[in-house]
Image: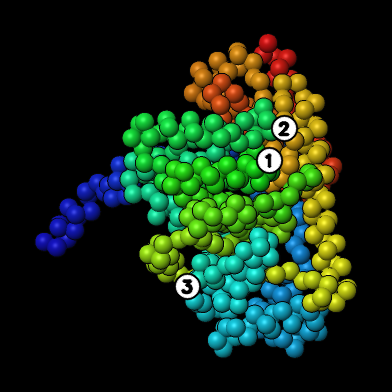
Amino acid sequence: MLSRISIKYFSRTYKASLNKDTIPSSIIRSEYAVRGAIAEKALKMQRQMEDEVKFPFEKIIQLNIGNPQNLGQKPISFNREVLASCLTNDIEGSRMIFSSDAVDRAEYYLSHFKHRAIGAYTDIQGVRCIMREVKSFIEKRDGVNVDENNIFLTNGATEGITFMLNLLIKDENDGIMIPIPQYPMYSALITKFEGTQVPYYLDESKGWGMSFEELERSYAEATDKGINVRSMVVINPGNPTGQVLAQEDLNRVIQFAHDKQIFLLADEVYQRNIYVDKEFCSVRKAIKELGSPYDNDVELASFHSLSKGLHGECGLRGGFLELHNIDSVVNLAIYKFKAVASCGNIIGQIGVGLMANPPTKDTVSKEVFDLYQTQEQHIHDGLKYRANLITEKLNSIQGITCNEIEGAMYAFPQIKLPQSYCDLAHQEGLSPDLKYCLEILDKTGIMIVPGSGFGQEEGTYHFRITNLVDSKSEMIKALDRIGEFTSDLMSLYK
């Protein structure tokens, strides 16, 4: 009898309880272009290459994502010596290998962990001594007073941004203003939390500048539809556009936010990546210098990250969130979010401390300081050289125009694709810029991301490309291949 029951039970067709019909529709609708169709296709090609399938190129070149060390950038020696010393927890042994200055810094961090246990959880907001380093960093940068209780050490900037968007969005009637083009994490998270994207367009003809009239138009259009605009995102320097906003632009944003009573989210992870004669100005500093009533009223969450900037330590997952003019109930809510996620990973937290409090000529030996400065300058010079190279090379290609890369890690050039090519793409169910990027990957092995994944003016087509390939010759070769492919395309589709 038991045997027959078992046979009958196991003969039923099993249907997965978690499938496309049962997972939240917001997850289905979320898209993240940077790791979308191009990345999926490249992964398949890479596996084929490992199986010795032949392609018309030797390797795939990843110009699609801001992942510096994956493209040859070397880490900063001082920082890695500190991290290594912390991980071994063998100070005397470390002194036999690393500089005394690096080991002294490691000893400082270890002394703030109970039992020197960096494998244990820290306080929810982070290690206090590192929070104080972040506090000092912001105060020195912006000339402000910072309450360290408004600082949260996070797993990259993404975690803090996720917390804030989750708090700001209750339902589909809540809108978040985002720049177009935008970093697609924002649109993906807004969709995930079932809010509404409220796009405001950057002006490509003015170097991806910001227009106050456009902010007003965007806000009015959303509110006319019954959308409750809760917040506005500012990305400076820009991703994917590479522009650096002037303080006057930020002042107008702050005045706009104050007038509309909306929350500001300042994504400032590329603040040290500037290649032109401009200075980075944080939103926090601009608020302070505008004075009352803005400094007393405007609500702000600012984000910074160890992943980007000059250090490029993406895999360490370190970042911080700083709050300004925040209701105590909101601070507690973020604390609850963070408590559920637990503390930021310890190595990332220490990395943030090293970013916020780098060695200076007054705190370390001349030899250590000179090496640190040399390594950072080498990284910056390489990024600047490639930013200029990309701008020059892309503008020399028929059909492509590219604004100057002022900062960050990217260019967002426009490509004027022939109408016959666009018609063919639409017949294939593809956006023309996606077809272009897929075909470049097929023919050249170069990964770039279609502009449609970031948002663009209707009727225009773009792609995003990084300036991160550390090899000068490889970067030139990649740009030449893009030029050759595009010239062939323009000749074929008249």
**For residue 230, side relative to residue 22 (left or right):** right
Q: Which residue is mark 2?
A: 403
Three-letter amino acid code at the position of disc 3: Ile
Q: How far across and down, in percent of the image, does residue 395 sit?
A: 77, 28
Q: Which residue is mark 1?
A: 243
Q: Nearer the viewer, residue 59 or 327?
A: 327
User: Cα distance, mark 2 to mark 1?
Assistant: 9 Å
Few, some or many residues within 10 Å of mark 2 (<14, 14–19, 20+): many
On-image quarter of the C terminus? top right
Three-letter amino acid code at the position of disc 2: Asn
Q: Which one is earlier in the sequence, the residue at label 2 or at label 1? A: 1
User: Cα distance, mark 1 to mark 3?
Assistant: 35 Å
Q: How far across and down, in percent of the image, does residue 453 sit?
A: 54, 35
Q: Residue at x 87, y 68 (%)?
A: 370
In the picture, the disc for residue 384 is none
Q: Residue at x 67, y 51 (%)?
A: 281
